[in-house]
Image (cartoon, rainbow, N blue to C red):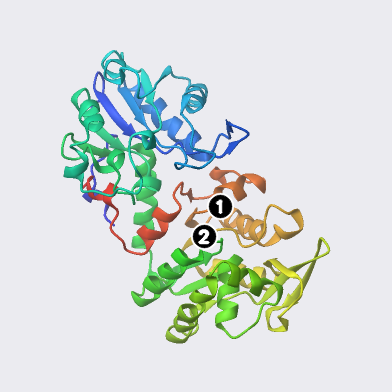
Amino acid sequence: MVLMAYKFISPQAVKGKTLAVRLDLNSPVEKGKIVVSARLREHAKTVAGLSKKGARLALLSHQGRKGDGDFIPLEQHAKALAGISGKKISFCGWQEDFVSAIKNLKDGEAVLLDNTRFQEDEAVEKSPEEHAKSPWIQKIASVSDFFVEDALSVSHRPHASVVGFAPLLPCFAGPQLEKELDALEKFGSAEPKKRLFILGGAKIGDSLKMIGFLLQNNRAEKILLGGLLGELFLKAGGLSLGERDAFFSEKGLDKLVPEAAEAMQKFPGKIFPPLDVALDEKGKRREIPAVKLPSESMIMDIGKKTISSMKKHIEDADFFVFNGPLGVFEKKQFAEGTKEIFSEFKKTKKTGILGGGDTETAIQALGFSMHDFYHVSLAGKALLECLSGETLPGLEILK
């Protein structure tokens, strides 16, 4: 990935210009109220920065999926953005005259349009040229000078609000996306033998695909595992997990075991499942060597030997990628693995990327700040796809 291949809004003169800006304000919703997320806070910086330069901003974002409880309008997001950015941000629903709302903006002002998924079907993936024919995209483009993509987290989706403006407007990467691309370029320039991946979390299908790509293409030397992904590779190594086996069966994850076993055979000495695990025994933590499995107790975290081994590998690395928590960090007694590795990254000030899944939630829950680390990505699946060498439609339009 070469930054020179992309166009950035940062050097552009935007005073008096109208920018259609695609953010990702998608936030957790509890009892009908949004929980202010890192995504919302970081995109608020983009809004504040562009507003300060005198741009007029038509902001676009989605929230939730149709049929889910978090599929709500964006009025709360507009208020939160205004509060964090310190800028005037109005809200406009799709049933209102949103074209006039954009045209009437003054320098430094912004309007957040409603949930883009009220307009677009996320299951419909078309080319930029096809999406550009959508009436709502054409209306916004007719009163805009530039399109700014600021969210890596949506760049893997060929949706109308992500790629539909490309045939109609000059397209640029925003400040937050520029940070993401800069970190990915650092990854690309690091010596492959000095790249370290620590992977956990629950979305093991995407991670398994990435592992295959990284090792097949010599893009990583060592891949250390925790969480559900670590358990998958323990099963692939011939171990029965005991109580956890039922979960794998219920979720249909057993079908991934042969693929994981094949990866271990094909790339010996490069994939490191947990050496030991922490079990939940009546609410208390008990650690056992992985070879002592199966157990009637549920696996909840990696153990101390695994933590110690990971720390040694971190010392030898020049660049790390951490994706997904290593245990059930929501429970204090099983947060040790994730917390210890976060502490090691903070202490050693290693260059790397943390991101994906519940990583950002874990960072906050365990008392860390995003500023404790080199880069915390706001992307999940899109980050994995980037690292897996896949083409992202939302980035292609910026070249």
Place of residue 18 in the rendered image (x, y in percent of width and height, measured from the top left): 25, 23
On the question of residue 312 being in view, the answer is no
Residue located beneath label 2 in the image: 322
**Of marks 1 and 2, the one in the foreground:** 1
Drawn side of residue 69 relative to residue 157, left or right = right
Report how far apart the C-alphas of labels 1 and 2 lie in the structure: 8 Å
**x 39%, y 44%: residue:** 179
For residue 21, above or below residue 263: above
Q: Please, what secondary structure does the residue beneath circle 1 have?
A: helix
**x 33%, y 49%: residue:** 157
**x 69%, y 84%: residue:** 291
Residue located beneath label 1 in the image: 359
Q: Please, what secondary structure does the residue beneath circle 2 have?
A: strand
Question: 241 or 375, which lies in front?
Answer: 241
Residue type indicated by callout 1: Thr
Question: 189 or 306, which lies in front?
Answer: 306
Place of residue 17 in the rendered image (x, y in percent of width and height, measured from the top left): 24, 22
User: Crowding near pointer 2: few (<14 within 10 Å), some, many (20+)?
Assistant: many
**x 49%, y 54%: residue:** 356
For residue 63, above or below residue 355: above
In which image quadrant can residue 103 be found?
top left
Drawn side of residue 237 relative to residue 115, left or right = right
Place of residue 36 in the rendered image (x, y in percent of width and height, measured from the top left): 56, 34
